[in-house]
Image: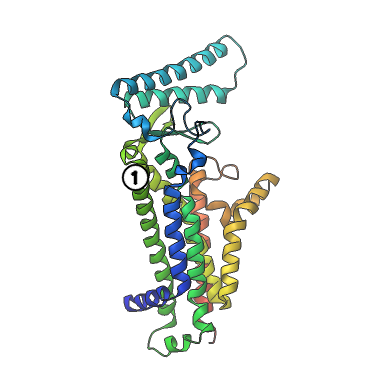
Amino acid sequence: MFKLIGNEYSKLFSRKTTQLLLLLLLLATIGLAFFFHLPLFNSSDSYETVASSSSGTEAAAEENTMSLEETLHARTEEAKLNYSQLKAQSDNGTPVDPSELEDAHNAYLIAQYIEDHQLESSLTFDSYGYPVTDSYLIRTLCQAPMLVTLLALVMIVVAGGIIANEFSQGTIKFLLINPVRRGKILWSKYLCCLSLLAGLFFLLFGLETLFLGFSYGFSAYGGQYVQVINGVATGTPILLYGFQQFLLASVNPLLMMTMAFAISSLFRSSALSIALGLGGLMGGSIITQILSQLGVDGGRYLPFSNTNLADIAAGTPYFPNQSLTFAVVTLIVYMVVFLLIAYDGFTRREV
């Protein structure tokens, strides 16, 4: 099996298409790490997702301990005052939106947590779901899962051609004359794709983490993502949070890769498998949003409706009462179906 996988890798990396896609992936990783150094973002105007009390750069790290304490304390007092005013209005019988009161309370708990732990860099989300941070490193890290979309594109091209190209180039006959079962050949190709996806995933995250450190300094990695769970503010190391978001986003390329692999095995056409895979990647979320807006509850059973695990885990799914467990089970079912289609198409049909 390992020899077959190694053979697939040698054929894969000898293709100029693969080399070009990997180069573009590397350039995108570097570009994102230095994106906010562009003149567009160097103006004095504050960005809506960067805390207005900060310059939004790593210059805050140069402040002395006392000024940091004063800044954090001022933020806590401001959040406390806002919550106290809303609470007083509610107690006096003035109509107050319960969600607004809860958001104000959570903001106070988060500000208190940041002050208690003297966090120089932190990440929170406002009531609209936008990230709030003083650090450009953390702000860019929140956008890093976009790289996983490019990774999905690479894997669709790889998986869409790994079987179909054997038929179009006539090399499938050389594989089948060997004393190896067709099923073993098929699984070696899928394991090649799967291991490549895993390798590129860790490589992308590692390189992005490294380039961001070079771009903005590594001090912000000491920050935390702060959230309120069951009325208690808790913090997660920012690097761990970034990895979790990367990991949740990787479900989409895994599903699209498997779908392209199945289509490649069934129709033996790389163009068709890549086209359908890219169509699912680009149009899946659009279809899901349309069905969600129209209130079509059956849309929750589509594979594209369950790939955004980060939003589902955060409690903001496309469809009501869509749980993380439901999404994972749905994706597993689709994955099994795709692999069965690939197996049947490769092992039972005549060459």
Where is 232 relative to 325, above or below? above
Colour pattern: rainbow
Check disc 1 and report its element: helix, strand or loop: helix
Where is 274 relative to 139, above or below? below
Q: Residue 54 location in percent, x, y?
A: 43, 28
Q: Residue 274 location in percent, x, y?
A: 56, 69
Depth check, front residue: 6 or 135: 135
| Residue at screen point 53% across, 56% down | 330
- Does any portion of residue 332 appear in the rendered image? no
Is residue 224 toward the left or the right of residue 262 in the image? left
Depth check, front residue: 19 or 312: 19
Q: Which residue is mark 1?
A: 213
| Residue at screen point 60% across, 51% down | 300
| Residue at screen point 51% across, 44% down | 311
Q: Residue furthest right?
A: 294
Q: How many marks?
A: 1
- Does any portion of residue 327 appear in the rendered image? yes
Q: Residue 219 location in percent, x, y?
A: 31, 38
Amino acid under label 1? Answer: Gly
**Res. 3 image quadrant:** bottom left
Quadrant into which the N terminus falls: bottom left
Q: Residue 115 location in percent, x, y?
A: 35, 23
Depth check, front residue: 4 or 229: 4
**Res. 295 image quadrant:** top right
| Residue at screen point 46% across, 43% down | 36
Depth check, front residue: 239 or 329: 239
Q: Residue furthest top?
A: 92
